Every structure is written in C-alpha cells, then in structure tokens.
Image (cartoon, rainbow, N blue to C red):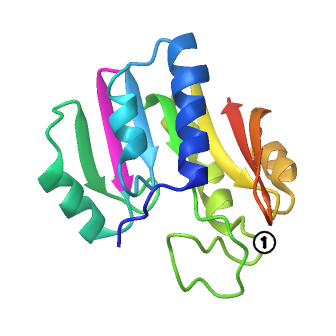
Amino acid sequence: MVYAPREDSFLLLRNMRGVILPRHKVKRVLDVGTGSGILAKEAAKFSKQVIACDIDKETIEKLKKENKNKKIKFIYSDLFSNIKNKFDLIVFNPPYLPSKKIKDKEIDGGKNGTEVIEKFLEKAKDFLNKNGKILLLCSSLNKNLTRLFKKYRYNYKKIDEENLFFEKLYVYELSK
C-alpha cells in the first residue's frame, strides 16, 4: 500500500527543496522508504540520479510503471539491503509512531518509535559520500533521538519543526 504524502512528507520536502538541494552540490540522492515517490521526484529536479527504495514490493512496482523520469530508479529494499552505492544526500521519512507490535510497516516505528530509525542510523553512514548529508524526519513522540545520533556518531542539527495536534515533527540534518 502506497504511503500517501501527509504533513511529514511535505515538511521533509520543503526542507529538501529549500535548505539542502540549493546549498549543496547533490549528484546522487537516496530516498529511503519512498512511499508515494514525492521526495524522489523533487530530488530529480536538482540531481543527476535518484535511487528510491521501499520495503513494499507493490509500491515499487506501481512507481516503476508510473515513472517517466530516467533519473529515478525505484528498487525494492528493506532500508539498505539492496543498496550498493554512496550518496550525497539520503532522505528518510521513517515509520516513527510508537507501538508495541509493528502491525503497519508504513507508520509503526516500534516500542519507542525509534526501532526503524536506529536500524537506519546503524548503516546510513556507509552509504554517504564524504560530505554527504542525511535529512531525517522525526517526531516528539520518539524517545532518545539525540542519544541515538550520539551513539552512532553523527553530527546533527534540528533544521525545522512543525506543530501538529498531538505531536511536533522535526527535520534533522545529519552528517558524518
């Protein structure tokens, strides 16, 4: 099932378009958990190549059929399982809602809402170019985010936030 763009997607899109892409030379972009492909499509306007991956095979097949942009390649991948290259920018709008059991892989982030985020952080550096950046969307419902950034030795800064009725969304810029 395709994750339809919502407030979180649009917040990440705004920061990718307005903060990262104009400021950095970005040739290769990785969109992890692409969902609707909205971030990949925007990134293709500013870069030479975009790899957009998702854990949902049906989503990837649908996006492949609809895709008319030769700069974008849609692939099935559980986070980095089928990713081979390094990137100037990695964007990730993860499943971040806390839940005891992961029932809906689009939105359930595990016990503290950070299980998927932690798996991502553990491997993401291996796929970043020397001066590469990560844009990561998180929620005020997520616990111990900065502890995770420190644990995996990322430089980090919060670059935007948005208040919703039951949570606050944050966009973090991470680097090696």
Give the tally of numbered discs: 1
Q: Badge 1 is on which residue?
A: 112
Q: Vertically, is 24 above or below 35? A: above
Query: Residue 32, image x and y in percent?
Result: 46, 50
Tell me the residue at 40%/58% (across/down).
35
132 and 173: which is toward the camera: 173
Tell me the residue at 51%/26% (across/down).
17
Q: Quadrant of the N terminus?
A: bottom left
150 and 102: which is toward the camera: 102
Q: Is residue 85 visible?
A: no
| Other residues around mark 1 within 10 Å, as few (<14) / some (14–19) / many (≥20) | some
Q: What is the quadrant of residue 175 in the picture?
A: top right
Q: Quadrant of the C terminus?
A: top right
Q: Is residue 136 left or right of residue 66?
A: right
Q: Is residue 65 left or right of residue 169?
A: left
Say whether residue 51 is magenta: yes
Say whether residue 43 is magenta: no
Q: What is the quadrant of residue 110 in the picture?
A: bottom right
Query: Residue 60, image x and y in percent?
Result: 26, 60
Q: Is residue 65 visible?
A: yes
Query: Residue 164, image x and y in percent?
Result: 75, 57
Tell me the residue at 57%/22% (across/down).
18
Q: What is the quadrant of residue 78 in the picture?
A: bottom left
Considering the whole magenta stretch, tell me its main secondary structure: strand
Q: Please name the amino acid that badge 1 sits on.
A: Asn
Tell me the residue at 29%/28% (across/down).
49
Q: Which residues are magenta?
A: 47-53
Residue lying farthest to the front in this orientation? 165
19 and 133: which is toward the camera: 19
Local SS, label 1: loop
